[in-house]
Structures are given as C-alpha cells and as structure tokens.
Image (spheres, grey):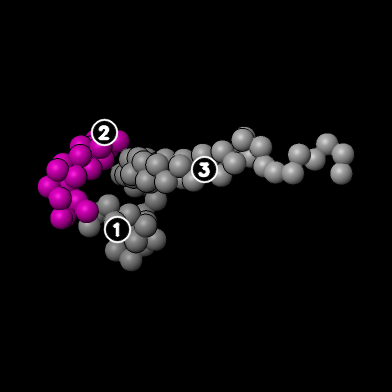
Amino acid sequence: MRGYNGGMGASSRLTPILISFLVAVAGPILYFLSIGPVAYLSSAGYIEYRAGSAIVYFYAPLFWTGRTCEQFDAVLTWYIHLWTDS
C-alpha cells in the first residue's frame, strides 16, 4: 500500500497511554469532587438522599473511607460544607 509506514506512529501509541492516565488520575478526583454538587442538590430538595437510594450506594466508598480515616473524613466534611449551608 502506498503511504503506509508499517507501524503505529508515536502519537498513535501515546493516545491509549494518555487516555489510561487521565482515567486513572482524573476519574477518582472527579468522583470525589462530584459529591459537593450532589450534597447541594440534596440540601436544596432537588434530589432525595435516603437509605437505599442509588446515591447512597454510589458514594458509599467515600463514606466508608471517611469512617476509617479521620483525615479523609475531615476533608470530606469540609468539602461538603462548602456546598451546603450546614
């Protein structure tokens, strides 16, 4: 074939590595940061935050980590209070 160089270029190899890195790093950060807007929507009455709801299960890892790590709980509580009046 004309114009085919027989392999992947440097940018083609870099793309999956970059995407994997962004998912591995940005994913958990965005997951943590997303609890603030959810706390706001819950406190404003737009969404219902109750036992057994999907939101409780979705954020259960954050709450579990907060129960097991005092420093994480302090940061989580501080961040949630930035979004809510309480």
Residue at disc 1, secondary structure: helix
Give the magenta part as a residue range.
65-86
The reply to whether residue 24 is in sight is yes
Counting from the top left corner in percent of width and height, residue 55 is at: 37, 56
Location of residue 3 by image quarter: top right
Choose mark 3 or mark 2, whichever is in front.
3
Could you say which is closer to the camera, residue 21 or residue 78?
21
Choose mark 2 or mark 1, whichever is in front.
1
Q: Amino acid type of disc 2?
A: Leu
Q: Amino acid type of disc 3?
A: Ile
The verdict on residue 25 being magenta is no
Which residue is pictured at 42% across the width and 40% down the height? Answer: 26
Query: In the rendered structure, which disc, 3 or 1, sits on the residue that comes first in sequence?
Result: 3
Could you say which is closer to the camera, residue 6 or residue 75?
6
In the picture, the quarter occupied by the N terminus is: top right
Q: Say which mark, if any, is on residue 17.
A: 3
Q: Say which mark, if any, is on residue 60.
A: 1
The verdict on residue 76 being magenta is yes
Residue at disc 3, secondary structure: helix
Counting from the top left corner in percent of width and height, residue 20 is at: 49, 46
Residue at disc 2, secondary structure: helix
Residue behind mark 2: 82
